[in-house]
Image (cartoon, rainbow, N blue to C red):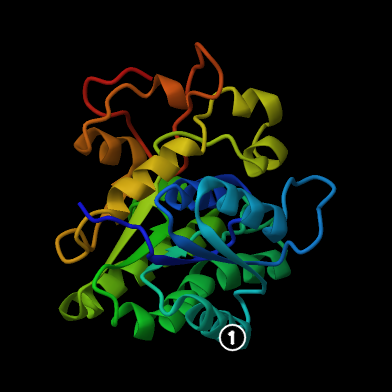
Amino acid sequence: MADLEGLTVFMSGGSRGIGLAIATRLAQDAVNVTIVAKTDEPHPKLPGTIHTAAEEIEAAGGSALPIVGDIRDEDQVARAVEQTVERFGGIDICVNNASAINLSSVGDLPVKRYDLMQAINARGTFVVTQACLPHLRESDHAHVLTLSPPLVTDPKWLSPHAAYTLSKLGMTMITLGVAGDERESGVGANCLWPRTMIATAAVQNLLGGDEAMGKSRKPSIVADAARAILVQDPRELTGRTLIDDEVLAEAGVHDLSAYVYQDDADLQLDLFVDSWPEGAAA
């Protein structure tokens, strides 16, 4: 297991939710974190900006560089990478966290919403990862970690929300492609996805409100799983699509009660996840 102290993380998104949880968890190891997001000003329905996120990262023990940027714009991403290297000297870890969600069917989804999801999710993962790669190749502990699901083939994940599924599986395909392309460079690339719904603003506002939140786990479970991946040798752990509780089980963590958002919750499986681990109770 590696010591992450002094390593530099380049993250898309990160103002709130899972991305912020990962950033602040890694900050406890005294890492440097660049977050690139559009949230320069507070949103009336969403907590946090890149500036409040930077404050939380610093308070947790890390060094933060908040950059206002849109990952759909490759020039903005390139400048953010340059700023990161100028500030911290390199990039060791790339976290593809930014994501847009709309669960409308093909018949109901406006084309502009389709384009938005593909541009942020699949294309954004491509743009951010590609921009980071020259610097990752120079690191001796280079990881790409993408918040995207396993490559599922069951058509049930298409009929309700084919466009969203396409965008998320696109993120996974790009990441697994990087794992193959960069194996000789020592750059590990993996995907991480939660077993259950995670209590975030997206779940609160888009996926069912308080009832859905009550069936969720806290973002900290994904954050702890992310760290458990990123401390490993990228030459040994690469090309995988991983589920948060399985990662923690491999790390020796089996009691997940601290991650439950609501006591005695009837947890709900997340999208693209069909079952519980063998012997585990929902």
260 sits to left or right of 104: left
Q: Position of residue 128 (x, y in %)?
A: 49, 76
Q: Position of residue 184 (x, y in %)?
A: 16, 80
Q: Nearer the viewer, residue 27 or 259?
A: 27
Pick the front one: 165 or 72:
72
Which residue does the numbered mark 1 point to in the structure image? 79
Tell me if residue 120 comes above or below residue 276 in the rendering: below
Residue 15: where, in percent of width, then height? 64, 55
Q: Going 68% across and 35% down the picture, which residue do you hit?
A: 204
Q: Residue at x 44, y 47 (%)?
A: 28
Residue at x 25%, y 71% (from the top left corner)? 179
Which amino acid does the dot numbered 1 rest on? Arg
Taking the view exactly as shown, the residue that stands out farthest to the right is 44
Q: Is residue 15 visible?
A: no
> Measured along the vertical axis of the image, is residue 137 above or below residue 187?
below
Which residue is the extreme one toward the top? 264
Q: Quadrant of residue 223?
A: top left
227 to the left or right of 84: left
